[in-house]
Amino acid sequence: MSTLRGRAGLGAGLKRRIKGPIRIAWWIFCFAFLLKSAGGMSPSAIPVFLSDDHAETFAWMTREFPLDEAHALLLVDAHADSSAVNHSDALRQALRRVSTLEERASRVSAWRRSGRIQAFNWIETLMPRPIDQVLWLAGTALAEARLESLTREAVGHLDARLEFEARASGALAERWQVGDLQSLENWRPPDLPIIVSIDLDFFHGLKPDDAGAAFDQIWAFAMGLPRLAGVSFSISRPWLSDDQEAGRLLVMALDAVLALDNRRFTFVQDEPGRPDDSLKAAEYGERKVPVPRFDWAGAGRAVRSRLQQAAMSAEHGETPQFELRLDDAVPSVDEVWRVEAGKSVVVRLLRHGHGAPAPPPRARWFLLEPGSPAIDLLPEAGLGKAFSKNEMGRAVWNRRIFLGESEDGAWALPLAGKGEDVGTWRVQAQVEVGGEWVWTPALELRRQQGQGFRRALSGQFRSPYAFGIGLVRRGELTGPDLGWGYDCANFLIAAWREHGVWMPWSDPAGLRKQLATIGENFRPADRPPLADLDVEEGLVIDFGPHVAAVWEDRPPRGTLGPEDLAVHHLGGFPEVIGMDRLTAGRGPFALRKRKQSAATRIWFGGDVVLDEREPDLRGIRQAAGDIMVVNLEGVGVRDATALPGRYRFVFPARHLSKLKEAGLAAVSLANNHALDAGLPGLLECLAEAGIADLGVAGIAGREPVVLSRDKPKIVLLAASLFEEAGEDGMIRTLPRDRAEIEQQLRELQRARAALVIMLHGGDEYSPHVNAAQRQWARWCVDRGANLVVFSHPHVVQPLESYRGRPVAFSLGNLVYPPELQGADSGAWLCVDFAADGNLVRTALIPIEQK
């Protein structure tokens, strides 16, 4: 028995002996242990491999899978590939008797170059380990007699050399089955990791629609396998009619790969000149023509673009030619488009990086629907099935639903009026380019309703249940931030994080540690009291292994009873459910809410622009008593004169002391007006700010400003997105100073400081956030910022969140000469830090009327 099978058997035995509440406790303990022991590691993505020659799958398997752990192989192929290999035991031993993986790869390459391993004999050396069993899917619809004939032929080849060459494992015939597409659904996969290997010659000769239907059936079956270990594709060009058929089948396969979100894709092009002793090669030899190979150099744009998209990571890859946008909307900082439920939605095709619509090409429009309502990302744990009504696969995949075709580069999505007005939709288009269809990146749309916590929950509807999602990591993104789905606890945590309250991804036990208990051991008949504010901010119904939240307090209001509504995510799509149904069959529950105890409060104001007149600082005194920080547009000098120009902001240095007296702790000078009095004026301003004991952020080479030295230690950095602000090297700018800022952030993170970054950028007097603001906000959070605050637009822009960290895109104006545009537009950002440096509350508060 292999190690993996041993673990599975032990878990199954324990679960059979553990009953009732003890069993529930066992699940909680096991999942908590997995979360702790994983140490932030992600469940592995599904490896996907593509090559010209099926023999390359042999090399891939020796690299990808433990050789002494048993797997099952689902072989989709027009040919058995089961020919015996000379001295196969010697090859098996040679695979294992290596000191490094590189040495093994070198041996396999040598076998491929010499022709010992070819497309017709690559399977036998991998049996009985790592391939313990094979199901050969030999055709779409085969008569019983044909299946029997193919079985005899396959196992005959597999064991052909046993009469004169002993094999340590003996005969392999009992490990080999043959089936067709009609019998696939009746196959009961063994309790082993399963590798799916698809040779595209399986679809040779089928009409395109028939090939597509057969492939879709196979792919859906593969994606639903609970222990899917990997997928390989082979083109096998010699068995196909021509490059046109090969390209069509390759596009079909790559389209499916692109709809698999948790893939890790590898492509290997076969080396020319390798021996080919196949019967098909002999046929070409008799005709005195070369054996055809797929012409990668001549592959069309459809193939090339898909290969590039399949191989690119979440953050890298070739810039797409087209992108999708919504009319009358802008994306949030996480590039998700959030719109009000009930609003009509028009998706428009743009050339990437252009603000204007592309010349209207032909476009096909698709919805990406979750391929499965439930996913188990920790299949080895054996715990996920306990939280789902059905068996769960580990593939995060999508079905493409064709909507229609347009000639004007736009499509109105038919979302309203179907009883599914809220939730997540993903849209994708194919664009006709040079006679071929090329995919755009997908656009994610969330339709939301209500306010606060429940509004965020509504945008998460229609997402799959993904057991173990909290452990997933890809690049800087973790957990549900990847858009793969939620489980019961992270469904709630994601809603809080969308509103700038950082919580780590967790299971119910971990979430419980972050909540305050209102009461425990409730049953519906107890009718515990409800407070409207608690419901709006997130009131958790805790059953132990499962958590839900109060959705609606129905009459009689003020208590939680069977008539009220809850919302939860368990084993399928999120649902709003009556408390009577939710509590049926479950034990007593507790009511809990988020802890909001704050250690430090800081107020961030918008732009402060001063002139020679005495400043009106009543707006600043609104936040008196707490730490206050603002963006200071301009410089204070001792010999200030009247403004020589409308946009030259210079003011008397004595105003700096007035700002300090009003309560300001620090200002950012990382802006496009810091040099309005030249370098001498900036240096004089810095000296005067030092005299006034006013902290200044955004100056290159200086230590960050410490806003609080107690727990938590909070530090402030600042940078401008305008290049001219840093012409003399004094003012920090991005991207020029990114290396220095990254280094400081790393050092501050090691010191466990809470990091605040103020950035100066955006479009003046626009309520909309631009792409540069979103890009640099993500950059800051990805490098450890707890909070990002922008200035410059002079009007209030949205308060959003990225990965649970608040981003205030503009706070407008705090102090401003009344004659200048936008003088009356401003708000405070009030932020509460907990003792661990995480934010427990963020709020935009209008500046009191002057």
Image (cartoon, rainbow, N blue to C red):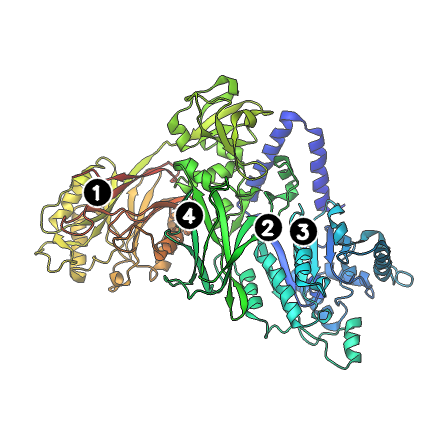
Residue position for label 4: 344
Residue position for label 3: 222
| Distance between the alpha carbons at the discs numbered 4 and 3 | 37 Å
Q: Dots 2 and 1: beta carbons under 8 Å?
A: no
| Distance between the alpha carbons at the discs numbered 2 and 4 | 39 Å
Looking at the picture, which amino acid does disc 1 mark? Leu
Assess disc 2: are there few (<14), some (14-19) or many (≥20) residues with their C-alpha within 10 Å of its C-alpha: some
Label 4 or label 3, whichever lies nearer to me, is: 4
| Distance between the alpha carbons at the discs numbered 1 and 3 | 61 Å
Q: Which residue is drawn at 69% across and 68% down?
A: 109
Residue position for label 2: 44
Q: Which comes sooner in the sequence, label 4 or label 3?
A: 3
Q: Left or right: 546 with respect to 652?
A: right
Q: What element carries label 4?
A: loop
Label 1 or label 3, whichever lies nearer to me, is: 3
Looking at the picture, which amino acid does disc 3 mark? Ala
Q: In the rendered image, which quarter contains the N terminus?
A: top right
Looking at the picture, which amino acid does disc 4 mark? Ser
Q: Dots 2 and 4: beta carbons under 8 Å?
A: no
